[in-house]
Image: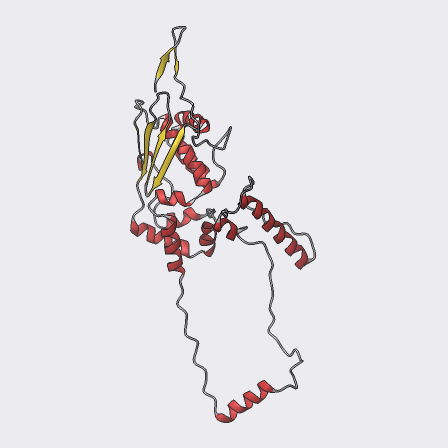
């Protein structure tokens, strides 16, 4: 940590150089991260005994000191503006999950259709970690040594405030795109969705062979089928029921496709259209059942 000499003879922490166009955390106070998975990411980091250092990084994240970052499989690289003119270079590496373990995870995921539906809609299923536990691995780092970091600043402590700031920016990025967590663990969004589709592909079964009818039996069936005597009669039909309920994932198509290029409003497209979808679902249920039924809230 760098220090400057104070006029009154003491020392005070140096202030970072203010920057324009940095990546600012949306959260202005309190915790950072809205979804359960971003909060889980932060709680895991705090469990390593880094609370004090993370707090300093949180202030940096809110000031917008992280200039940019690039995430690739198992690695994040970023530049963070500190108290000197030249920004610091930060890297965070997390050991990827092995191919064999990932195959097991995908197999577990494929057992629940809701997993694929929610992931494709940009949401993380609440019990997604169960799929990883079944493969004897963890989605999030379990120990501090599972994370390898480096910063070009002179601070020997780890994490320094520059690394910690990147941790928090990642938390909010995870809110937006949960697939980034998977990429840190070794699989991209395309890898996972393609593997899920392949795993869930079911071979079309050949229809069972029908009994061969004699010429007379065939003629009788054809005559019965063409008979007009019972055409307007309802006859006997198998009972059936229809259930109308809100979808498991609200506005899934909108979330999957994202904001279209023609959208020039300042309002968030997914949020706006999602509200319409919820209202339509609510009114459809009221119409179907003749009573007011609260639609499932969007997550």
Residue 135, position in %: x, y?
A: 35, 50
Q: In which quarter of the image is the N terminus?
A: top left
Residue 84 vertical placement versus 138 (above, below): above
User: x and y percent of residue 187 in the render?
Assistant: 34, 48
State which quadrant residue 286 falls in: bottom right
Residue 115 appears left or right of 135: right
Is 196 or 142 nearer to us in this picture? 196
The front one of 111 and 215 is: 215
Q: Is residue 21 visible?
A: yes
Q: Position of residue 246 (x, y in %)?
A: 58, 54
Which picture quadrant has residue 162? top left
Q: How is the image coloured?
A: secondary structure
Residue drawn at 43 percent across, 48 percent down: 128
Q: Which residue lies at the image location 39% right of the left edge and 25% below the top edge?
A: 53
Q: Can residue 299 be seen in this view?
A: no
Picture residue at 45% right of the left edge, 50% below the top: 119
Residue 155, how many percent across, how many down?
32, 22
Residue furthest to the right in view is: 290
Horizontal relation, residue 181 to residue 227: left or right: left
- Residue in the picture at 30% in, 27% down: 152
Q: Is residue 45 above or below residue 211?
A: above
Residue 72 occupies which quadrant of the picture? top left
Which of the pair 261/53 is nearer the observer? 261
């Amino acid at each position: 940590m760098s220090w400057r000499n104070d006029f009154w003879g003491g020392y005070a922490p140096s202030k970072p150089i203010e920057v324009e166009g940095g990546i600012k955390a949306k959260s202005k106070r309190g915790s950072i991260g809205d979804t359960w998975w971003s909060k889980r990411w932060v709680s895991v980091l705090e469990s390593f005994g880094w609370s004090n250092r993370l707090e300093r990084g949180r202030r940096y994240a809110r000031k917008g000191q992280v200039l940019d970052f690039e995430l690739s499989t198992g690695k994040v690289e970023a530049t963070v503006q500190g108290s000197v003119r030249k920004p610091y270079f930060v890297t965070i590496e997390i050991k990827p999950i092995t191919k064999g373990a990932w195959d097991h995870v995908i197999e577990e995921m494929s057992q629940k259709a809701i997993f694929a539906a929610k992931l494709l809609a940009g949401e993380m299923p609440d019990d997604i970690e169960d799929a990883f536990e079944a493969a004897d691995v963890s989605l999030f780092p379990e120990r501090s040594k599972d994370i390898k970091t480096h910063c070009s600043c002179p601070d020997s402590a780890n994490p320094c405030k520059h690394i910690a700031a990147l941790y928090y920016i990642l938390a909010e990025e995870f809110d937006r795109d949960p697939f980034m967590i998977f990429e840190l663990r070794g699989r991209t969004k395309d890898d996972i969705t393609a593997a899920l589709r392949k795993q869930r592909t079911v071979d079309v079964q050949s229809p069972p062979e029908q009994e061969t009818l004699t010429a007379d039996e065939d003629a009788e069936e054809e005559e019965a089928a063409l008979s007009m005597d019972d055409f307007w009669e309802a006859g006997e039909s198998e009972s059936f029921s229809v259930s109308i309920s809100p979808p498991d994932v609200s506005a899934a198509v909108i979330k999957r496709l994202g904001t279209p290029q023609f959208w020039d409003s300042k309002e968030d497209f997914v949020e706006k259209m999602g509200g319409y979808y919820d209202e339509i679902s609510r009114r459809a249920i009221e119409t179907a059942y003749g009573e007011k039924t609260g639609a499932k809230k969007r997550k």
